[in-house]
Image (cartoon, rainbow, N blue to C red):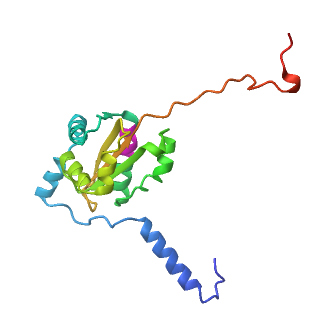
Amino acid sequence: MPDPSSPMRPLFAAALALLAAGCAGEPRRATPLDARATERLAAVTLDPAEATRIFNAYRTSQGLGPVRLDPALTAMAQRQADAMARANTLSHDAAGNFAARVHAAGLDAARAAENLGGGYYSAEEAFAGWRTSSGHDANLRMKEATRFGIALAKDPQTQYRAWWALVVAGEPEKRVEMSAGPVGWFGSNRPTR
């Protein structure tokens, strides 16, 4: 912290205030939604079987293999969607750094990706939006992908109201167990005959 008499103190205080404001996300709506908007948001649902059908139909049209819904990836996606709604911000870091979340979930980071979306009122809209974005589309078309998780969080007082998260991953790497015995014989550890 700068010296209280320093001319830099006001600049430091202003920078700190801006930093704190940036972490807060967008301000929440102070007024309630009108009846039609409330009804429309209430109708937004996520049917995992429908999402699987949409995703696999697209992958098949691209010559790629199917993916299956994975409970661990779905839980990871739900934490992300909930965090974005809570923070009112569309960010891969809302629930923590993506790489750290991937590691904590035990995934192979080289074969995991995440798509986020806000304001989509159906899974079909979310997938359509992701297909029109080259980076998100590349994630949908990840050749190594075999599983996915998808989630929806809703909050009528936020900017997007409906928050979507999709996590795609390949199969986890097989871990090689090392034996507890010696790797080789050196000097005095040679077995006796």
Q: Which residue sits at x=58%, y=84%?
A: 9
Q: Position of residue 87 (x, y in %)?
A: 38, 59
Q: Which residue sits at x=43%, y=71%?
A: 21
Q: Position of residue 92 (x, y in %)?
A: 40, 55
Residue located farthest toward the top when viewing the structure as drawn: 193
- Displayed quadrant of residue 183: top right
Magenta residues: mostly which secondary structure?
helix
Q: Position of residue 118 (x, y in %)?
A: 27, 56
Quadrant of the frame with the N terminus: bottom right
Q: Is residue 127 left or right of residue 191?
A: left
Quadrant of the frame with the C terminus: top right
Q: Nearer the viewer, residue 102 or 31?
A: 102
The magenta region covers 73-79
Number of marks in picture: 0
Q: Is residue 24 above or below residue 72?
A: below
Q: Nearer the viewer, residue 147 or 145?
A: 145
Q: Does the magenta segment cover residue 76?
A: yes
Q: Which residue sits at x=47%, y=39%?
A: 107
Q: Which residue sits at x=51%, y=49%?
A: 100
Q: Nearer the viewer, residue 42 or 69?
A: 69
Residue located farthest toward the right when viewing the structure as drawn: 188
Q: Nearer the viewer, residue 109 or 36?
A: 109
Q: Position of residue 156 (x, y in %)?
A: 24, 56
Q: Does the magenta segment cover residue 142?
A: no
Q: Is residue 67 above or below residue 38?
A: above
